[in-house]
Amino acid sequence: MKYKFLILIAFLFVSSFSFAQDKKSKGDDFFFEYKYPQAIIEYKKEKNEKPLSKKQILNLADSYLRTNNYKNAMDTYLSIYKEDTEISTYHFNNMLQAMAKTSGQDRVKAFLATKTDVLSNELLENAEFNYELQDSEIANDLNYQIFNINSNGPASDFSPSFYKDDKLLFTSTRSLKANNKKGNKEKEYLEIFVAKVGVDGQILNPNPFLDVPASDFHQATPFYSEAKDAVFYVSSNTQEDQLTFDENGKNSLAVMMAAGEESAQYLLRDPSTSFYYPFYDANTSRLYFAANFPDGFGGTDLYYVDTNEGKIMSAPINLGSRINTPGNEVSPFVFENSLYFASDIFYGLGGMDIYKSEMQGDESFSIPVNLGLGLNSAEDDFGFIIKNNKTEGLTGYFSSNRAEGKGKDDIYGFNVDEKPGLKTLVLRGKVTNSGSKEGVSKAAVRIYDTEQNLIKEIYSNEDGTYRLEIPWRESIVLEVSKERYSSQIQSFDKTATENLEANGSVDMNLLFLDDLVEEKEDQTVLKLKKFYFQKGRSVITPEVAAELDKAVLVVKSFPQLQLRIESHTDSRGGGATNFRLSQQRADAIKDYLEQHGVSTSNILYAIGYGEDKIINSCKNGVYCLEQLHNQNERQLIVVLNYDLIY
């Protein structure tokens, strides 16, 4: 086919109908007609005559990739990338796809490690998470019962959708119509078909779907909404039964909604932008779709618009960099608060793969998890749908061009006992300084299992926020720490972990050691409000205890501190009495700290100096005001190893 509709599924990076491409060379002609082998031949010929443009070199690399010549594809992409690292994210993804096929994932991982400063955190985290799953035994081990649909044939059958109680809609090339209106027999169009679903999940007696207005052009990728009793689908952009073109001669695909064969309306329509794979979520009244807007993250991205009674109520909203990647994302489907979609991102198993991401309350998403071998293959797998069985378990369908199929694209059915996709646990929050309430950057955030085995470690962002995601565990331990800060540990049992699933927000407050000490008398001491014992006594009063409790908290937060407790009196009274009183007070402070959890190993000395270290002129025989005498009566908790700790 001159217009190979699989391009819509996986690789459509240009508008859907390209009658007026820049035809500067035969290589370009063949490339934009998706005739990649011929494009390679022509580009190589033209290269001998004059240097190819950067765009043509990228076209050549894409042609190598599409014909599975991964070594030449990688070398060609790298030749451009070494000269200009600002290649599009779309071609960056293609380059890594070719690298993975040629040199394996280890080289891709090593390459990514050199680009952490320019790639998004979401992309790197998504890649790391899915690589870990592929290398571990945690990956989805559900027992899928997958079967090829008997009605598949040599044509392309794809994009299944549940219809009413016992039917299936899908897109097919099995009944191709020539573009008689244009007199061009090479242009062929897709149709929507409907078939009854048998008790064994097989589809029976497919026929053209007649409950949408007839068209001589593309009608494809349907989704039936039971809540609205309407079909959403893509259609060629037409006016008065004629194709419409933008100023560059491109005809795009639009999203339509039909509530019967005589009633249809355009919902999403742009002369230069194509829309693909509509999905309507009745719970939120959102219409999801794929599109290749120029400000996206890569090829086609997933978006949604808010709707009300069939009217679009918002501008398209991109699902963000957690879902959308430098590759192509298509075929969104929401089931039980999980978003399923297909992507050809480089860390997949090959071609398009099906992923699942949990939709979270604040419009964020969990890391998309590859559904693994079985549902996914080394080829293109997409168009995933699923529903609960009337008896037990779940039933679904998807499309694939895997080698064992009957046609270019086949529809496969599957039965499974549990909801597909690895369940994950997301923790996010903010690490703050308890004193200043400001965020703490680069704090270590660690997750342990109940056996104290480290599961994952990350570092907080510049503003102190963090986000961490792991395969689901019923019980975990969260620890946050940073040099010169205290650490905080929080344990979550099964109930607490399930509550985390609902909101996932855990804020952690750390003490900053520098905020807790100060310089006095040429030494580092704990920062406490000045407190006084009763005259001539060493009893710990509530006022004294309130300050000592602060010291207890500091030492428990920083158990490596080594302390010297100092007690000083003023010069009033006898020297021996003052010495004895100050020692009693130092001992009382030491006893209080130890009774409240400070280890004896933290307190190296408790010394009473009496009146030996007067800090002003109020010595024996000198008249002084009360406030000057009070300056000399003081209790200090000295940190002996402050300069040695870090």
Image (spheres, rainbow, N blue to C red):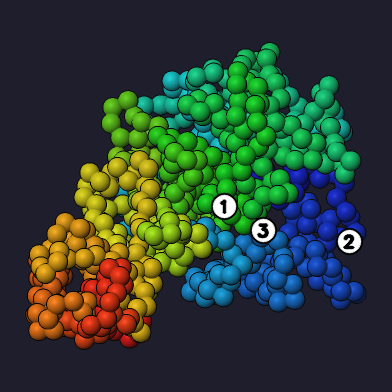
Q: Quadrant of the N terminus?
A: top right
Please give the residue where the numbered disc 2 appears in the rendered image. 25
Please give the residue where the numbered disc 3 appears in the rendered image. 90
| Disc 1 versus disc 2: nearer the observer | 1
* Residue neighbourhood size for the residue with mark 3, other residues' Cα within 10 Å, grouped as few (<14), some (14–19), many (≥20): some
Give me the residue at 37% from left, 47% from top.
Answer: 504
Q: Are marks 1 and 2 in contact (CB under 8 Å)?
A: no
- Residue 313 shown left or right of residue 474 in the figure: right
Residue 246 image point, x, y percent: 85, 38
Q: Type of residue at label 2? A: Ser
* Gap between marks 1 and 2 measured at Cα: 36 Å
Secondary structure under the numbered disc 3 in the rendered image? helix
Which mark is first along the chain, 3 or 1?
3
Please give the residue where the numbered disc 1 appears in the rendered image. 321
Q: Quadrant of residue 646?
A: bottom left
* Gap between marks 2 and 3 measured at Cα: 23 Å
